[in-house]
Amino acid sequence: MANKTLHIVAFDMPYPPEYGGVIDIFFKIKALHEMGAKIILHVFLYAGKEPSRMLEQLCTKVYYYPRRRFKNPFSGELPYIVATRNDADLLRNLRTDQHPILFEGLHSTSFLPHPALRNRFKIVRTHNVEHTYYRALEDSESSFFKKYFFRIEAERLEKYEPVLRNAQCIAAISPSDTGYYDGKFGNTRYLPAFHSNMELLCKPGKGKFVLYHGNMGVGENNKAALYLVHEVFPQLELPCIIAGNNPSRQLQQAVSGQSHISLADHISSGDILKLVQEAQVNVMVTFQNTGIKLKLLNSLHRGRHCVANTMMVENTGLESLVQIGDSADELVKLIKQCWKEEFTPEMLSRRKEGLAAGFDNLTNARKLLDWLV
């Protein structure tokens, strides 16, 4: 196993690991490196990001390619997220040997069906059912042009998805996604999300506030935060914090009118994780049940009581570790119950047992290496 070498094609710079998709990629690379694998990494750089010495320490070789974002996002039959990541140098570098290739996300699969790679062992790591995810982005978006882009991108992604038949293995990120892809294409295996939590850092005792966190620049998170501010938090006479950067003007205005709700923005990921650890209750709501939400894993590894709706935890294997409610009244009731209860060492022990079953990075890296041919 220690001698295995593989190519990884990343759709974005994995370091620093600042959001869900690249968190999974970076900590997968780190775990594979710790298992002794040799990694040839291919990265698409854009949005002002630069090469990383950290990645070069973890990998045998790192290649960087520009993403062609000048392309018209409304034209062409290929999904924009695929058509902007098809640099000819990538294909040339993949052809220099016969090692297996891991394509991260449908985004990176431009050369998956290429005849030159016909005899290679190819795995695609799916981070979502992408066309479902993009339709949910459309529903969460208020900008006309963004809504239109998400709509046509969802249509293109659904038409493009059969490209996965060219992979020898699909590594899905959640049990529900595994069932979807296996039903359509077969050869699908469940590979849980890789994450930053090497140990449980939950603090026994009680915290002093209720927390919702996420990147508020993402439509899904903004929608969830607005729901909590309008429907749930007003029913609580408790300190409530919404933590995350890039809050919408609508969210800022909604928070400003309620004295017991505060907005923590211009905040580092480290500071958000400290808030997760200090909160008495971490509330997690989503209106799209694709993939797995890394905020769920962060809250379970670092936080005290966790309250979520069904879409956040369904088919994750983590349902028993979370208090689940779907209506605003149910969420309010659960938050009030958790507010009164100390987080005990016994609760921590149960959580440790529940998380150990599926979300250990090294165990999952070993599983991935075992699949390689």
Image (cartoon, grey):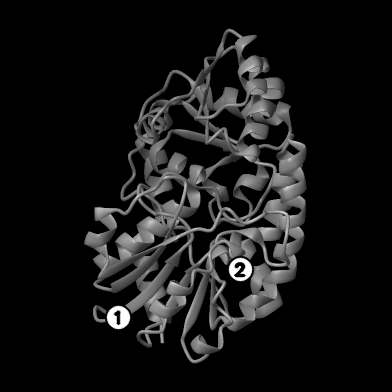
Q: Is residue 220 visible?
A: yes
Local secondary structure at mark 2 = helix
Q: Quadrant of the N terminus?
A: bottom left
Image location (x, y in percent) of residue 285: 63, 37
Check disc 2 and give the amino acid type.
Answer: Thr
Q: Is residue 264 above or below residue 74?
A: above
Residue 15 vs 283, above or below: the answer is below
Residue tagged 2: 178
Q: Quadrant of residue 146?
A: top right
Q: Is residue 351 above or below residue 368?
A: above
Query: Quadrant of the image for the C terminus?
Result: bottom left
Cα separation between marks 2 and 1: 25 Å
Q: Is residue 327 left or right of residue 14?
A: right
Which is closer to the viewer, label 2 or label 1? 1
Q: Residue at x 61, y 68 (%)?
A: 178
Tell me the tag on residue 4: 1
Q: Residue at x 44, y 18 (%)?
A: 208
The percent coordinates of residue 177 (x first, y second) are 63, 64
Q: Of the residues shown, which amino acid type is indicated by label 1?
A: Lys
Residue 100 position within the rendered picture, expressed as x and y whole percent measured from the top left: 41, 82
Q: Where's residue 15, x and y in %? A: 35, 51
Give the residue drawn at x 66%, y 51%.
289
Q: Which residue is nearer to you in this view: 238 or 133?
A: 133
| Secondary structure under the numbered disc 1 in the rendered image | loop
Q: Is residue 149 left or right of residue 274?
A: right
